[in-house]
Image: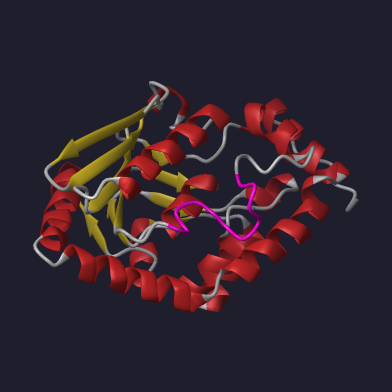
Amino acid sequence: MDLPPTIRFDTQGHIATMTIDRPDAMNALTPEMLTGLDAAFEEFNSDDGLWVAILTGAGDKSFCSGMDLKAAIPMLTEGDSLGYDDPTKRQFSDIFKPIICAVNGYCIAGGLEMLEGTDLRIAAEHATFGLGEVRWGIIPTGGTHIRLPRQIPWAVAMELLLTGKPIDAERAHSIGLINRVVPAAELTPSAQELAETICKNGPLAVRTAKEIAVRALGLESGFALERILGERVMQSADAKEGPQAFLEKRPPQFTGH
């Protein structure tokens, strides 16, 4: 498995840990990193000796701040799916082994979309969750419109999607987006303890329980709809103006086209 240095894959017993390791850039993902992360999870998924995965970020400031806009936006506004060639699939949507997300700071944009594809979530007290895309004339296209309203109350999902304003870890816990809030020093041990607890159970039973739950949601048609309608936004003039304004640190001038 050939991974970029910014994606780490470590194993201990039946547990695999994937670490997004670009803390100097708030663990923002480049297309190369996204491909590497997918490869790491494919390796986890195909290894019968690995039963549970932990996904986290390096450092203490950010789990993942989403895609690196400089690299990703030109591709997205030209219709590139950033690796999701099948419109009915999204990140982790066909992985039925449990994934624990350990959130060590900012979990925003594509970072939050990744979290939505995981099963159990533990966050440090200073973690922040948000989807700020609409503030820059774009939308999250990693499955959020389909997953998030199924995971938290509708009104809260719409608040996150339509205002672009973030929420803190305590509110994320109160709405059921995450399982537990812990001091930063306890984040990794807590995730490890949870993984070890799951590993005491029958691995086939655990995988099957998750597969039934995920397949019963019927997410595929929603993912395809998001892709089709999302292109209307991502190929608009506003989708070019917003990220450019973000990079130039100025208010965007939207036209609605």
Image quarter hosting the N terminus: top left
- Give the prevailing secondary structure in the magenta stretch: loop
On screen, residue 18 versus residue 228, left or right, reads: left
Query: Which residue sits at x=40%, y=56%?
Result: 95
Q: Which residue is drawn at 50% across and 36% down?
A: 34
Instruction: Pick the residue in front: 193 or 93.
Output: 93
Tell me if 225 is positioned left or right of 104 in this view.
right
| Left or right: residue 73 compared with residue 68 | right
Up-down: is 118 above or below 7? below
Viewer-proximal residue among 186 and 16: 16
Q: In which quarter of the image is residue 176?
A: bottom left
Tell me residue 80's x, y (percent): 72, 39
Q: In this view, does 51 lie to the left or right of 212?
A: left
Q: Out of 22 and 155, give the one closest to the viewer.
A: 22
Q: Where is residue 153 in the image (x, y as percent from the top left)?
A: 49, 77
- What segment is highlighted magenta in the picture? 84-94
Q: Indicate how the structure is coloured in the image.
A: secondary structure
Percent of width and height locating residue 16: 23, 43
Magenta includes 93?
A: yes
State the image coordinates of residue 30 (x, y, percent, origin top left). 54, 29
Q: Is residue 182 magenta?
A: no
The structure residue drawn at horizontal position 75% and vertical position 48%, both measured from the top left corner, is 137
Residue 152 in sight: no
> Quick check: 200 above or below 175?
above
